Image (cartoon, coloured by chain):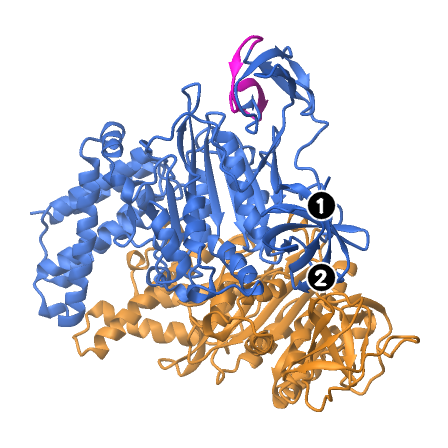
Chain colours: A blue, B orange
Amino acid sequence: MKSTGKVIGIVSNLVTVETTGPVAENELCYINLAGTDLMAEVIKVNGNKASVQVFESTRGLKNGDTVEFEGKMLEATLGPGLLSSVYDGLENNLATMEGVFLKRGEYTDPLDHEKLWEFTPIAKAGDKVVAGDWLGEVKEGWLPHKIMVPFAFKGEFTVKSVIEAGSYNIDKVIAVLTSEDGEDVDVTMTQKWPVKVAIKAYKEKPRPSKIMETGVRVIDSFNPIAEGGTGFIPGPFGCGKTVLQHAIAQQGEADVIVMAACGERANEVVEIFTEFPELIDPHTGRYLMERTTIICNTSNMPVAAREASVYTAMTICEYYRAMGLRSLLLADSTSRWAQALREMSNRMEELPGADAFPVDLSAIISNFYSRAGQVVLNNGQKGSVTFIGTVSPAGGNLKEPVTEGTKKAARCFYALEQNRADQKRYPAVNPIDSYSKYLEYPEIVEYLDKTVEEGWVANVNRAKNLVRKGKEAQEQINILGDDGVPISYHENFWKSELIDFCFLQQDAFDKIDATTPIERQKYMLDLILGICDRSFNYEDFEECRGFFKNVINIIRQMNYSEFKSEQFDKYLNELNKTLDENGK
Amino acid sequence: MANKAYQRIYTQLDAITKATVTLKAKGVSNDELAVVHGKLAQVVKTKGDSVTLQIFSGTEGILTNAEVTFLGSAPTVKVSDQLSGRFFDAYGHPLDGGPEIEGEERVIGGPSVNPYKRRMPSELIPTGIAGIDLNNTLVSGQKIPFFADPDQPYNQVMADVALRADVDRIILGGMGLSNDDYLFFKHAFESAGALDKIVSFVNTTENPPVERLLIPDMALTAAEYFAVDKNEKVLVLLTDMTSYADALSIVSNRMDQIPSKDSMPGSLYSDLAKIYEKAVQLPTDGSITIIAVTTLNDGDITHAIPDNTGYITEGQLFLRNDSDSGKVIIDPFRSLSRLKQRVQGKKTREDHSQVMNAGVRLYADAQNAKTKLENGFDLSDYDLRCLDYAKEYATKLLAIDVNISVTEMLDTAWEIFAKYFTKAETGIKAAIADKYWPEK
């Protein structure tokens, strides 16, 4: 029997409930407000008093209102049809809601129960299977969507029957399994899974060994993220966090993209679902929306559902990973999620940690990041969840709890810098402060040697060093003046500007420059390093500046041209001419 | 809001702070309004039988045996076309001596628009100010604040923008306005002959600070009436949001909440977002655009109020006193309109974004030259040209007293580029530069 209770205290969306029976941490409940059921989650239990966070506005709620506990945690519904959908943080389908305004207590089904899917069996009667094993497959857009043994099934099962190929809706029983106890269980195309628990239906979780291309030069070449890796982008507002995330969402080399808009602007979500249906995925030639799921809890939606939104998004990524696919989760921004935790902790009058955040913040963040990764499934196939989160540090100061907690958990760090943004040097990723731990992995270095070129990482490090040297030279020039330093300082400075303007900076709004495949990145970096290796004639620093400015201008025009097109070659010839005229 | 018949009256207060009172009462709902000793109050916390009320006008003079009655609903505002041309206080009562409004009573601070039902903002709002139109173009459905020090003429700029913008309705939400500024707005609207399309909700510094908390929701509920029910293009002006946030911190402090950064409540982000996210382009032609003011302390944008605001709004317009031109300018470095790409080159001439970027880049070079000059170094020929450019650029384009069309702004920019630089130095795409570079 379900436990019930009644409301005895209300502060904003934190409600205290006196219960009649047992309740569990994170258990779901519904509070009845004048005939409308408001979903809430237990976050603390003390004797027969449960503190619950309500996922809706509590306006009008009264002490004495009744509560019904559900005996389960917040669950995601998984099945074909998740892609191209727009959900709220609790996985309600926003497209099927009526009216312009969100109605309190309106919960919609995440999946379409009418739609027919073309099913093909994979398993056959007599097969031994465990949770996560593939029973059959439907085509979701162009993706092979595996129908799996539900993750919640414990122990080994024998397949009793699998339905023959044909068109079925998601509620159709597609297989019957027999448990070790001889009990028959039906399997449909959908299953449920509690979002705060990681899906572990895989054999092992090896270290990432491949790069996930994003088409963004400062990431792919300078600080690449691995497939199944983790990264984060902290930055003050106005530094281009969102533009960079959208670029990664559009160009990232993944089969499935889940965008979690967590406490961010609604218009950014609108931008995604208006543009993605028309944009083409550069890797497959299909529409971007076909591989994208949007989970949005925009900043004006109920705070408690913000936390749920990132977990729901992660669960969907893990679900597709179990099909042997590469999924990419982009969460913008994890700081808003941390703030939601802070608001609740504050209302519960817990003793605060740094900046009034809950003391276990760092542990919560690490735990979440650990759900990403590359896995080897039971059948030997590989799948991955790559996770990139943004962080919005208060006042742009990176010494704050969310940034510090995330730095411990994420392997790549893309520091967006106010100074670069002010100078419109986009993407404003600081090339020196940012890092990718993956460049230290021997398996990744080997992968790059094989796929890009032998000694690639050494080349990248050389470029980084040139940027560093240029920065030092610039400081000296600023202190001593143009005339007070040898010309080699100017040369070093301008070489770093060459790398900055022609390689690190990238125009996200230019059709061609926005995406640079790794092959083109290699070509351009080799070209630029080649220039840095040469010596040129200039009498004084004015000539040095003039020369490099000219070179930069030509290479930028190359960046705007189709790779190796006639126009590209024209600028290349012009470049070579300029180099030869001035070369020693 | 007269007392209804047979209403239970409570007369025993257990605790009184500067902004709240606590008493024992039954059947009270969250967010419900109440009247305490004739003053309007709202339920902010219930615990067992104990109810905490926030008194909007402060608790001075309230006795522990004061009469308390509950009104049964959250704060409301009456909406109808009669709102036009009128001035109201934070409770929606007329300030202008006119009659009370008749219309539908709506609860303020209502639900948000389903993000899926929104449309992408895509209509240009021209203001004539090049620092805005050229570098930080505004789009209908956008939310954007002015970041300004208290000594800068932000209310004047905002009034200019409002009166020049092509909108159906302007709604002013004044929080902690000085009486002089209130009269300024009144005069500006009257003398522009635009009063009939303007609705104002005003709380001046003479009124209690906590009352301010009602102003944005009042203004935005009225805005939703015109945008959703009447399909109008509505522009909402909120000044000054720093006063609003200060009022929030007073209340949270009185409720013994643990403050986060800069003694602001931990929920500041959500509180501000709830207001700004009301900006919307509806699937019909209706829209709500919000232009706000956040006053800064000596240009410090790392303070919790501007910082949280910057993360919520779609950019910010930064006012700065410029010593080169001797004018107040829209700072091109710190200002940003996140939606500008929606209209630049689409609703304006194709060269718009290239011209904008080149203009700002060269202005940055001028700043470097200035630093060199200040440090006593010799300036190169390029540096000197940059400095001259910066002065002209600031005077003719960045200053807030500019009032020209976007095409004129672009032409002016090309003229200034050609006066001081070569095509290559501007770094503009060759195809665009060749087409628009002025003949000598």
* Chain letter of the residue carrying label 2: A
Q: Residue furthest front?
A: A47
Q: Is residue A570 left or right of residue A213?
A: left
Amino acid, disc 2: Ile
Q: Is residue B133 left or right of residue A454?
A: right
Amino acid, disc 1: Ser
Q: What quarter of the picture does the N terminus of chain A occupy?
A: top right
Residue A3, numbered circle: 1
Which residues are drawn in magenta? A124-144
Q: Earlier in the sequence, mark 2 or mark 1?
A: 1
- Dot 2: what SS? strand
- For residue B219: magenta? no
Residue A8, numbered circle: 2
Q: Residues within 10 Å of mark 1 (few under 14, many from 20)?
A: some
Residue A519, numbered circle: none
Q: Position of residue B151 (x, y in %)?
A: 48, 85
- Residue shown at 81%/55% (left/top)? A34
Q: Quadrant of residue A374?
A: top left
- Regarding residue B256, the answer to whether it shows in the image is yes
- Residue shown at 53%/44% (left/top)? A311
The image shows residue B394, relative to residue A354, as above or below, that is below
